[in-house]
Image (cartoon, rainbow, N blue to C red):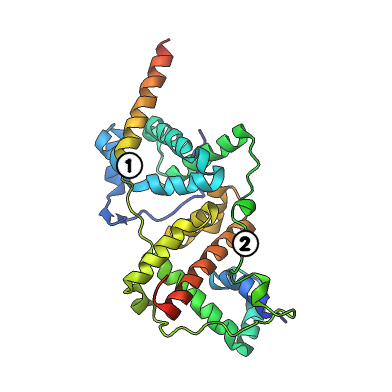
Amino acid sequence: MTQSPSALKDKAPHTEKGIAIDESQLIAQLVCGDDRAFRQLITLHHSLMLHIARAIVGDTFADDVVQEAWVSVYNNIANFERRSSLKTWLLTIVSNQAKARLRKESRQVSLDQLDGEVPGSYLDGAHFKADGHWQQATPQWSNESPDALLEEQQLQRCINRTLTLLPPAQKAAFILRDIEQQSFEDICNILAVSAANVRVLVHRARLTLMQVIDRYQETGSC
Amino acid sequence: MLNCKQVATLASDYLDNDTPLKWKIRLHLLMCANCRRFIRHLKITKEVSAQMVINQPTEDAEIVWKNLQARMNKEVQSDKE
């Protein structure tokens, strides 16, 4: 199994999805073979690992890849050297498992194919004149306050629903970059795509979410 | 001189401070209210959506755990054989 690269570093979180976590204590429990701690680890990170696996290897194999990754984690947790955070180590393992499965299945999955440009998105030709200027004025928002927008529960539902509909690679890139705050370099390693492709994936996801806010500002719904 | 489509394409790189074309984009933004609004809205989107996304802890932890146990037992059995 490939060890997590020392270059992959991120912050050790104090909370994880609303659950207070003491990472050192959790690692100590895991190393001691505490099954309850391992179930906690699964609860915390399984969803994110599934997003990563789906982005690399597709829906068909993702569940199996993550299950293999958990076996690998279980077998190797005693050797975890803490050169990166536990989460980064887990992401590296699932990424390596997914890449290995991709090679084994000899499937030519292109992230660009998976996440092609959505018609009607901001960057399609219809929004621009031949000289590259906007066809129409960009939409006005009546509410430009992030704090006020964060209070809008309907908008939150719209954004979460849209996120579930994003193509897997876009979703994984967006989650890793904007939620998990991983560096582009780390995301490249985890998703096995070029830096340029990661940037494109993140940008497309943000543009789709911006259109959700556009619609919400205009209609008050998704 | 960049046009609006190029600025829209580079908007995330600009917000992430990750483009050598930063000054060309700024020059365009000085003159283009539409692109200023576009970039401002993308910045708000980035901030708001990242905080709004609800990452539910998986509800399948017990199933994953049981599958893991089953795989481990299978591995142990095949090692014995």
- Which residue is painted at 64% across and 79% down in the image? B25
Relative depth, front residue between B36 and A209: A209
Q: Chain of mark 2?
A: A
The numbered mark at residue A97 is: none
Residue A195, relative to residue B80: is it above or below? below
How many discs mark residues in the rendered view? 2
Question: What kind of residue is marked 1?
Answer: Asp
Q: Residue furthest right?
A: A130
Picture residue at 39% right of the left edge, 15% below the top:
B77
Give the left or right position of residue A121, taking residue B60 as reference.
Answer: right
Q: Is residue A5 left or right of residue A143?
A: right
Badge 1: residue crowd in 10 Å (few <14, some 14–19, many ≥20): few
What residue is rendered at 28% in x and 32% in y? A32
Per the rendering, the mark at residue B60 is 1
Q: Chain of mark 1?
A: B
Q: Could you tell me residue A91's position as x and y percent?
A: 46, 45
Give the amino acid type for the residue marked by disc 2 in the picture: Glu
Which residue, given by chain and number where applicable, does mark 2 sit on? A117
